[in-house]
Image (spheres, rainbow, N blue to C red):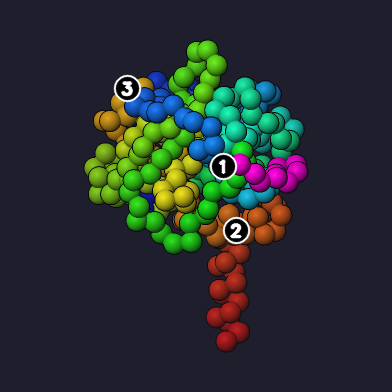
C-alpha cells in the first residue's frame, strides 16, 4: 500500500496547532458498552489529547503527532476501560513508562506518523479492556470502523464510531498529489488523531490527518498504514521500547552482514 506526501493546506487550514481533537465524527452511531475494549485515550496533564489502540498488555499504538509538544512521559496518562463505559470521564488512567515516536517522523508532512506508548504496568484483559490484532499481511478489506470522541464536546462526552472505506492509491493521488509508502486514504469521518482503523478485527490504520468539519463525505482522511510499520512495531516491543535503535537501519545492516559473509 502506498502513502501520500501530504499537500494539506486545504485539509488542515482550520485545524489547530497539533491537529488534535478537531476531528468530526458526524454520521455516527452512539455505542453500547463493550464494543471497543481496545480503544484507548491519551491525556496530557489531565486533558484529552488523542485516541489510541491497545495492541498488547503494555503497549498502545497511536500517532506520533500526539507528542509534538513534549515526549516527557511524566506528563501523560493513558485511559483504558472503554469496553465497560462509553464516557470519557469514566476511563481508568494508567501511567506511561515511555513514548516511542518513529525516528523518521516528520512533523510538517505527517510522514511516518506513528508512535508506541509503553505503559507503566501491564493491563489485565477482561470484558472492559482488550487488545486489537496487528496485521500479519497487507489488508484488502475496504469496509472498516473507527471510534473516537470527535467534536462532541458538550455534556458528558461519549464514545462514538463511524464506518469508513479505504480508497485506492489512484484516488488518493488525484486529491493529494504524490504517493509514497506508509499512508493511505480513507473516506469517512476520522474520529480522534491516533485512533485505530479496524477492519475485520485487525487494526489497519491510525488516524493521522482528518478533514474539516462538515467535509467527511467530500475528502478522505489520511491514515498511517499499520502493516507498513509492522517490523518497527515488533522490534520496538521486542527490545523493550528503546528509542535509540532505528529498526530500518538495523535491518539494512543485518542484510549487508549476511551478504558479505555468505
Mark 3 = which residue? 214
Q: Is residue 140 left or right of residue 96?
A: left
Element on which disc 3 rests: loop
| Residue 123 lies within the magenta run | yes
Front one among 41 and 102: 41
- Residue 198 x/y as whole percent: 44, 45
Mark 2 = which residue? 234
Callout 2 environment at 10 Å: few (<14), some (14 to 19), or many (20+)? some
Name the residue at 34% across, 56% down.
140
Mark 1 = which residue? 38
* Span of residues in magenta: 119-127
- Residue 105 x/y as whole percent: 53, 44
Residue 12 visible somewhere in the drawing: no
Q: Determine the image quadrant of residue 259.
A: bottom right
Name the residue at 55% across, 67% down.
252
**Of helix, strand and loop, which mostly describes the magenta segment?**
loop
Callout 3 environment at 10 Å: few (<14), some (14 to 19), or many (20+)? some
Image quadrant occupied by the C terminus: bottom right
Residue 58 visible somewhere in the drawing: yes
Q: Residue furthest bottom?
A: 262
Front one among 240 and 252: 240
Callout 1 environment at 10 Å: few (<14), some (14 to 19), or many (20+)? many
Report the mark closest to the observer, 1 or 2: 1
**In this picture, is 257 found above or below 119?**
below
Front one among 121 and 220: 121
Image quadrant occupied by the N terminus: bottom left
Calculate the distance from the C-alpha at mark 2 to the C-alpha at mark 3. 37 Å
Amino acid at each position: 500500500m502506498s502513502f501520500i506526501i501530504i499537500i494539506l493546506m486545504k485539509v488542515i487550514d482550520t485545524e489547530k496547532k497539533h491537529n488534535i481533537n478537531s476531528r468530526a465524527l458526524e454520521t455516527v452511531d452512539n455505542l453500547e458498552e463493550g464494543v471497543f475494549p481496545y480503544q484507548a485515550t491519551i491525556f496530557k496533564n489531565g486533558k484529552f489529547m488523542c485516541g489510541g489502540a491497545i495492541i498488547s498488555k503494555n503497549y498502545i499504538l497511536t500517532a506520533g503527532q500526539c507528542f509534538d509538544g513534549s515526549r516527557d512521559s511524566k506528563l501523560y496518562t493513558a485511559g483504558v476501560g472503554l469496553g465497560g463505559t462509553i464516557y470519557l470521564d469514566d476511563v481508568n488512567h494508567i501511567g506511561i513508562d515511555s513514548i516511542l515516536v518513529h525516528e523518521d517522523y516528520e512533523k510538517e508532512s505527517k510522514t511516518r506518523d506513528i508512535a508506541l506508548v509503553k505503559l507503566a504496568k501491564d493491563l489485565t484483559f477482561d470484558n472492559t479492556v482488550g487488545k486489537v490484532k496487528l496485521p500479519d499481511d497487507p489488508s484488502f478489506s475496504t469496509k472498516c470502523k473507527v471510534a473516537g470522541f470527535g467534536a462532541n464536546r458538550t455534556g458528558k462526552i461519549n464514545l462514538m464510531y463511524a464506518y469508513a472505506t479505504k480508497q485506492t492509491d489512484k484516488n488518493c493521488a488525484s486529491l493529494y498529489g504524490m504517493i509514497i509508502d506508509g499512508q493511505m486514504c480513507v473516506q469517512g469521518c476520522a474520529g480522534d488523531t491516533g485512533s485505530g482503523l479496524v477492519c475485520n478485527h485487525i487494526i489497519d490504520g491510525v488516524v493521522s490527518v482528518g478533514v474539516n468539519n462538515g467535509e467527511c463525505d467530500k475528502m478522505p482522511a489520511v491514515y498511517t498504514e499499520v502493516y507498513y510499520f509492522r517490523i518497527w512495531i515488533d522490534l520496538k516491543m521486542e527490545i523493550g521500547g528503546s528509542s535509540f535503535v532505528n529498526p530500518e537501519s538495523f535491518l539494512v545492516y543485518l542484510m549487508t552482514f549476511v551478504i558479505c559473509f555468505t
